[in-house]
Image (cartoon, rainbow, N blue to C red):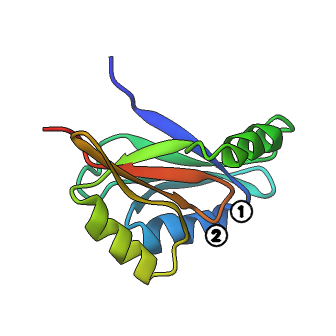
Amino acid sequence: MKIHLTSVFVDDQAKALRFYTEVLGFVKKYDVPLGETDRWLTVVSPEEPGGTELLLEPAGHPAVKPYRDALAADGIPLAQFAVTDVRAEYERLSGLGVRFTQEPLEMGPVTTAVFDDTCGNLIQIATQPQ
């Protein structure tokens, strides 16, 4: 068994697609219209185009807003992405205007940082222990 797809709820799929591709560097995999306004919209790492997909899921369900608001208020990231060098990625993303809620922090063998994805979520980046 392996993880094939996971999702983040987003307020605006077009805005999310721009952020996740143009800023974070993911690539669009699927963009399938669903009804009048929604899309099945996934992105993947350019390093693993056949790997785990991230669904940029519309945040229309009534339970989404209180859930995301509670996580954000407590500073809890909705997802974590692996990077090779947290400090370098922090500098790169900061230079692109990304707002971090936690600067790089070393915790034993792991370094993390947390940013606002502009779509209603906090996202953590982390190095993975060797």
- Where does the image place residue 62, in percent across and percent down from the top left? 87, 38
Question: Which element carries disc 1, helix, strand or loop?
Answer: loop
Answer left or right for 53 relative to 56.
left
Answer left or right for 117 relative to 114.
right
Pointer 1 and pointer 2: residues touching (CB < 8 Å)? yes
In front of the other: 74 or 78: 74
- Where does the image place residue 59, in percent across and percent down from the top left? 75, 47
The label shown at residue 15 is 2
Residue farthest along the top direction in this orientation: 1
In front of the other: 16 or 80: 80
The label shown at residue 88 is none
Mark 2: few/some/many CA within 10 Å (<14, 14-19, 20+): few
Q: Residue at 25% x, 49% y: name it.
A: 48
27 over 65 or under it: above or below: below
Answer left or right for 24 relative to 97.
left
130 over 88 or under it: above or below: above
52 over 21 or under it: above or below: above
Pointer 1: what residue? 12
Gap between marks 1 and 2 measured at Cα: 5 Å
Under mark 2, the amino acid is: Lys
Q: Residue at 58% x, 52% y: name it.
A: 122
Q: Residue at 76% x, 46% y: name it.
A: 69
- Where does the image place residue 128, in percent across and percent down from the top left? 24, 42
Residue farthest along the left direction in this orientation: 130
Question: Which element carries disc 2, helix, strand or loop?
Answer: helix
Position of the C terminus by quadrant: top left
Under mark 1, the amino acid is: Asp
Q: Residue at 40% x, 32% y: name it.
A: 4
